[in-house]
Amino acid sequence: MTEVLNKEEQEKELLKLLQSQNMDVFREKFLDWHLYEQGQFYLSLDKKERHLMYAYLSPKEMADMLDVIEEDHEGLTDYITEMSPNYVVAILENMYTDNAVDILSQLEEETARTYLDRMKPETSVNMKRLLHYEDKTAGSIMATEYVSIVANQTVRSALTLLKKKAQEAEIIYYVYVVSLTNQLVGVISLRDLIVSDDDMMIEEMMGERVISVGVNEDQEEVAKMIRDYDFLAIPVVDDNNHLLGIITVDDIIDVIDDEAASDYSGLAGVDVEATTESSFQAALKRLPWLVTLLFLGMSTASLISHYEVLISEASILAVFISLITGTAGNAGTQSLAVAVRKLAVSDDKELNFFSLIMSEILTGIITGAVTGVVIFLVVGFWKQNFPLGMVIGIAMLCAITIANLAGSLIPILMEKIGFDPAVASGPFITTLSDLTSVLIYFNIAGLFMPLIVGSV
Amino acid sequence: MTEVLNKEEQEKELLKLLQSQNMDVFREKFLDWHLYEQGQFYLSLDKKERHLMYAYLSPKEMADMLDVIEEDHEGLTDYITEMSPNYVVAILENMYTDNAVDILSQLEEETARTYLDRMKPETSVNMKRLLHYEDKTAGSIMATEYVSIVANQTVRSALTLLKKKAQEAEIIYYVYVVSLTNQLVGVISLRDLIVSDDDMMIEEMMGERVISVGVNEDQEEVAKMIRDYDFLAIPVVDDNNHLLGIITVDDIIDVIDDEAASDYSGLAGVDVEATTESSFQAALKRLPWLVTLLFLGMSTASLISHYEVLISEASILAVFISLITGTAGNAGTQSLAVAVRKLAVSDDKELNFFSLIMSEILTGIITGAVTGVVIFLVVGFWKQNFPLGMVIGIAMLCAITIANLAGSLIPILMEKIGFDPAVASGPFITTLSDLTSVLIYFNIAGLFMPLIVGSV
C-alpha cells in the first residue's frame, strides 16, 4: 500500500512531475486518473505546461480525455488551435464522432477545413456529413460508433463480433440488428446476449419494436424519449429507416442542462450560461434587452402623462401606481412560468390551449379578488378613503386578470407561430403588464374621481 | 409480415381486446410493447379496465412496467391502493428497490407498513433501511440491485457469476469489486470484461481509483458527478467505504429535471411542477407569495406617500415612477438569474463571492449609465425639460446599480446562511427594488426641484 495523498496533494505532485519533465512517472500517475480528472488537471495548466502534455500524451490518450470534458468546456477551441495540426487531426480521428464534430463546428470554417483535409478520407467524409445536420437536431448530436449485426447468426457469433467492435463503439450495451441494406430491424441488449443460450439465433430473440428517432428530430424531443423510456442510447434513422447513428444518454444530459438553462435565461431576460465574461461584455449583452424594455416602459410613462390632470387633482393616485403595476407583474410572471413549463413538458396534441388560458384567467380572477379585497381594506383604513380603496381594489383585480391572460397567451402564441415560448421573458411580461395596469387603473380612477377627491 | 397499424390504431385494438376479456391475445400484443408504452396505455385506462389488467398481468410484469413509469407519475399511489394487498406486495418485491421505496415513501405510513409487514423478511428489512435515508440524499435514490464480485478470480468466473445476476441487477454495465467485508476496492466495466482474456485475474485489470459518493451526499452533487464523469451509474458507500447501493443515470435525469424545475419555479415565485391542479388550488398556492409581496409593495406606496408634496408641486414626477422601478427591476432580475446560476454550477471554494458582487455592480454601473443617458435625452427632448431628464437619468443609474447589488447579494447571503439561493425569486427582487428605486428617485428629484419646476 502506497502512502495516501489527498486530491490536492496529488495534483501538486503531478504538476511538479510535469514541470520537472519527468515524463515516465508523470504518465504513469496521470493515466491512472479518471478521464474527467485528467481533463480538470489539463484545464488548470498554463500554456507552457499544456505544450509539455502534448509532447507526453499520445493523440489517443488526449482524445479519450477530451471526449469526457469537451461538452462542458466552451474555450476548448483555443486549446485545439495551439496544438500542431497533425496532432489535432490524430486526436479528432480518435474521438467519438459526435464530440469531434462538436469541436469542428465551433472552429472557424477555414481552420476546420484544414483539419478535415488532412484526415483519412472515410473519416473526413463521415464528419463532413455530420457537420451538415442542422444545429439542435438528432443528426447534429449523434455518434456513428454503434454496434450493428445481422439477424441470421447465433448469440455466440454476435458476441464474438461484439468483442471486436467493443473498443471502438461509444456504447456497447445495445446491439442494433440491421438488414443487408442497413435498415434497422431489431435491437438486443447486451444483458440479453449475455444471459441467453449461445446457440440461440439473433432473429428469434431480438426486439422488433425498435424505438428510434428521425435524423431531423429536435434534440429536446430526443431527450424526452430517452428520459421517458429510460434508455441508455437511442438509434437515429433516416426517412427510409436506415440506421445512421446513436445518441447516448450522456449527451442527452447535456441537452437537458442546456434547455433548462435556456428556459431559465428566457424567464430572466439574460443569458446565464456565459459565465466567464467581463462586466463590460455582460453589460453589452444585457443592454439591448434593457433598452428595448425601456422604450416599452416609455409608453407606460407617456400613458401616465395623459393622466397628469387626474394626478394633479389627486396626487394620492400616484402613490399606488407602482403597487398595482408591481403586483400585476408578479402575477403575470407566475402565469408565464406555469404556461412555459406546461408547453415544455406536454405534447402539443395533449395540451388544450384554450383550457390553459381559461384556467389562468380564472386563477387571475381568484387571486385578483383576494388581493383586491386586501388592498381595499388596507387603503381604506390607512388613508381613510374607501372610494380610493375600492378603485385600487378593482384595478388590482382587473390588472392581475389581464396580466395572467398575457402571461399565458403570449408564450402560447409564440409556440403557435413557431418560436420557442421560453424566450417570452419575465421582464417583458412585467413591462407589458405595467402598461395595461396603468390604463386600467386611471380609467377606473377617472370614473370615481369625484368620490376620491371628496374623501381626500 | 402482419398488417402495420399505427400507434393509435394499436391502442384501440388493445383496448378492445381488454374490454372483450380476450386475455391471451391481449397479453401477447401488450407484452410485445415497450414498457414505457405499456405504462402509458395503463395510465389511460379507467378503473374497471385497470382491474382487468391486474387479473391478466403477473406481479413481475406489472413491476417491470411500473419501474419505467413510476418516476414521472405522482398519482400512482391511488392506483397502488386499488390493487389487492398481496398483489401490491408481490409487485414491490419485484421492482427495483429504489423505485419500490419511492412508491412506499409516497404512501400513507400505515398503508406502507401493511405492505412491508407482508414482504419477505430480508426484502422488508432492506426497504425499511432505505426508507430511513433523508429525502434528496444519495441513500434515498439508490438501488441495491448491483453486481459485486471479489478480486481473486478470473474474468471467466466473473462472467459466469454476472450471467446469474444479470436478470436481477438494475444495471450490469459496471461490476463492483469488493473485499470480504464488502468494502469497495475496484470497478470493472462490462466492456472490459468482454474484451479481456478469459484467464486474466480481476485484481490485475480492475480500476482501483473508484469514484463513489457518500450515502448522505446531496442528490444534486451526485447528479453533477454522473454528468461530469459521463457515468451510467455511481456506487454509494458509507463512511467506512462499504458498498451500499448504486445510483443509475436514469434516476439522475429525473433529479436534474426536478432541480431545473425548482430553480425555474424560484425565479418566477410559483411552483411550476404541479400541473394537474385546478384554478382554485393554483390560486391558493400563489396567493401567499402575492400577498406577501403586496405588503412589501405597500411600503413602496407609503414611501411615495411621503413625497406627495413633491408630486403635487410637479405631477410630472409621477409619470416616471413606473419607468424607473420597472427598468431597475428588469436589471435586478438579470443579476439575480446570473448569480443563482453561478452558485448552482460552481463549487463553493472556486467561487469568489466578493468578485461576483463587484462584477454585478460594475455591470450595473455600465448598463445604468447607458440607460441613464438614453432616458436623459428622451425625456429632455420629449418634455423639453433637461433638468428632469437629468434627474431621471441619474436616478436610473443609481437604481439599476442598487438593483444589481441586491440581485447578486441576496442569493449569496441565502447560500451563506444555508438556504437554497434559487428560492430568491424574481418577483421578490423586483418588489424590493421598487422600494429602493423610489427612494433614490424622489431624493434626487428633491435636490433639483427648483430646476424641474422652473422648466415645466
Image (spheres, coloured by chain):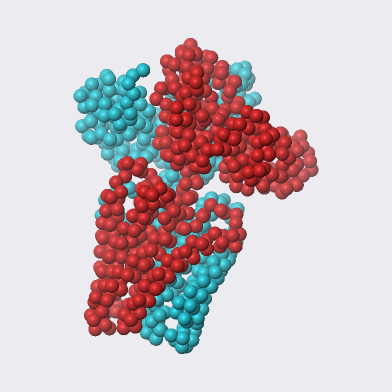
Chain colours: A red, B cyan
The N terminus of chain B, quarter of image = top left
Horizontal placement of B194 versus A192: left or right? right
Q: Is residue B147 above or below residue A432?
A: above
Q: Nearer the viewer, residue A46 or B59?
A: A46
Q: Residue at x 31, y 80 (%)?
A: A310
> Which residue is most to the top?
A199
Q: Is residue B130 above or below residue A268?
A: above
Query: Is residue A377 shown to the viewer in this render?
Result: no
**Residue B103 x %, y %:** 35, 38
**Residue B256 x %, y %:** 46, 44
Horizontal placement of A6 versus B290: left or right? right
The C terminus of chain B, quarter of image = bottom left
Q: Residue at x 38, y 44 (%)?
A: A345
**Residue A215 x %, y %:** 48, 34
Query: Is residue B342 shown to the viewer in this render?
Result: yes
Q: Is residue A41 above or below residue A178?
A: below
**Residue B52 x %, y %:** 23, 27
Q: Residue at x 50, y 21 (%)?
A: A181
The tally of labels here is 0
Q: Residue at x 29, y 25 (%)?
A: B57
Q: Nearer the viewer, residue B145 or A428?
A: A428
Quarter occupied by residue A52:
top right
